[in-house]
Image (spheres, coloured by chain):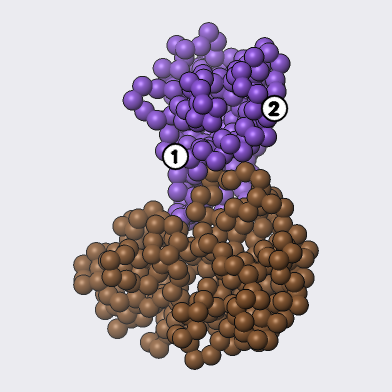
Chain colours: A purple, B brown
């Protein structure tokens, strides 16, 4: 039995996230069916590195799949890209150790939240960026971003349904950067793991900091008390990208 | 009577070009109807700086429109953007002289042709770039690009139906650049005016130069003889953007 480690990218606009669901189209379902079609087998189960919410994108997403077929890795990449719809692409494929699991072996993940900060909407970034037309206070956001770095209880930066799913809401954030480039603001967060909606709430809190609705003190309080009210809003999925997975 | 000079951008993927047509949705029709709705008048005729083909995009496109209404320019921009679909945006609006005409007053136009030159398709650039997966020979293309600069008869770089539309096929190209950046190749062409499919044939010829199917000598012959056979293919509209209009 081979264990293939595959990197894909996808435009999540038309999907209800990665993970298979009843009655809703997901990336997992489409990829599994495509593997089945390519190898002329029953669609196998693939193991993704992460759930992603409806509408969230992935620049690099990893899954592994166990197959018997001896198709060369290069042939797998080309064959998949011929059959897959235009909003999913296979970037690479390699043989992995038998015990490699794309979800449980991750060392870190990096997300990017992309904001169109120009006055007018960007007609080429529909569903690919969050449009925030008022000038963002980048330096204030950069100062506040530093507070998230380190091991913290991120319970205040987690959607309430998500808290019940996990044993602990403690996570380690390795870095948070806020960069402005040609009217777009990119917030990049790398961490050991992420809670439900954590990136969208952290970025929403940084927007509130720019607006003066939250202060650095509020963020410290949120991290100390786990009280969601000291954090900011949850930004929409359109601007969120899984940028990289580290093993 | 006011004469408004308006810049818009549009994602042309879903439109049959700018210019109004029977039985096909065009940018002109949508913009005219939106002005009618905003000002509660019969949709006025707008004068665009250019036709663009079906599927072609515009980063900056200018039109003028004569109206009686005294809506402030800023109100026009905001009101239009509230009503327009997400793939068209108004960038600016200003008062113009009575005799300003967006088509006839252009001094120059600049087009960009965008090529995804990475092995895999880019799921975020569907219908926004031409995917050419084989490594392009940028230096050869840059050498060949220089040959187009200057006043030439571009008859060989014009779709045959287009030749009959114009008195002369002589045009002046001010500059052609070929730049590679993070896997994307951007070909930028600025000129006095352009023939039907001229940019898509010039860029297709540069691709042929990269592939060794055409030489610099062939381009010189094409410019001297007007013989279409010495030029290259016509690239698809997906990668083409009207980048700027100069007055």
Residue B52 visible, this orientation: yes
Q: Considering only vertical position in the picture, is B241 above or below A154? A: below
Q: Which mark is residue A13?
A: 1
Q: Is residue A57 left or right of residue A246?
A: left
Q: Residues within 10 Å of mark 1 (few under 14, many from 20)?
A: some
Number of callouts: 2
Label 1 and label 2 in one chain: yes
Residue located 24% across and 64% down the image: B37
Question: Would you place residue B199 above or below residue A30 in this image?
Answer: below
The picture places residue B142, in percent across and down from the top left corner, at 75, 68
Q: Residue at x 34, y 76 (%)?
A: B46
Residue at 75% across / 74% down in the picture?
B216
Determine which quarter of the picture holds residue B120. Answer: top right
- Give the mark toward the camera: 1 or 2: 2
For mark 2, give the secondary structure: strand
Q: Provide residue A112's location: percent of width, then percent of height.
A: 58, 36
Q: Kindly identify which numbered label has been placed on residue A30.
A: none
Instruction: Return the disc, 1 or 2, that comes first in the chain's sequence.
Output: 1
Tell me which chain the residue with mark 1 is part of.
Answer: A
Q: Dividing the image into 4 quarters, which one contains the N terminus of chain B?
A: bottom left
| Residue drawn 31% across the image and 65% down it | B24
- Image spot of residue A162 (x, y percent): 45, 17
Callout 1 secondary element: helix
Q: CA distance from mark 1 to mark 2?
A: 28 Å
Q: Which residue, as the protein is rendered here, is positioned at the far top?
A: A167
- In front of the other: A244 or B121: B121
The front one of A158 and B30 is: B30
- Residue B223, position in %: x, y? 66, 83
Note whether B27 is above or below B104 in the view shown. Answer: above
**How busy is the neighbourhood of tag 2: few (under 14 within 10 Å), some, or many (20 plus)?**
some
Q: Which residue is mark 2?
A: A94
């Amino acid at each position: 039995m081979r264990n293939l480690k595959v990197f894909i990218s996808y435009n999540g606009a038309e999907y209800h996230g990665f993970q298979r669901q009843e009655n809703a189209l997901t990336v997992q379902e489409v990829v599994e069916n495509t593997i089945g079609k390519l190898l002329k087998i029953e669609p196998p189960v693939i193991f993704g590195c992460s759930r992603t919410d409806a509408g969230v994108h992935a620049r690099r997403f990893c899954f592994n799949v166990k197959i018997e077929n001896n198709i060369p890795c290069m042939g797998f990449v080309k064959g998949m890209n011929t059959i897959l719809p235009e909003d999913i692409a296979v970037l690479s494929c390699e043989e992995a150790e038998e015990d490699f699991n794309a979800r449980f072996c991750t060392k870190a993940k990096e997300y990017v939240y992309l904001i169109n900060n120009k006055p007018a909407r960007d007609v080429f970034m529909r569903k690919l960026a969050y449009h925030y037309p008022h000038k963002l206070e980048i330096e204030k956001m950069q100062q506040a971003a530093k507070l998230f770095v380190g091991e913290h209880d991120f319970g205040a930066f987690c959607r309430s349904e998500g808290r019940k799913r996990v044993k602990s809401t403690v996570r380690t954030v390795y870095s948070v950067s806020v960069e402005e480039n040609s009217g777009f603001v990119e917030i990049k967060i790398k961490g050991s793991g992420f809670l439900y909606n954590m990136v969208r709430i952290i970025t929403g809190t940084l927007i509130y900091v720019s607006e003066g609705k939250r202060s650095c003190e509020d963020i410290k309080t949120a991290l100390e008390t786990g009280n969601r009210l000291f954090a900011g809003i949850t930004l929409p999925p359109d601007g969120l990208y899984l940028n990289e997975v580290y093993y």
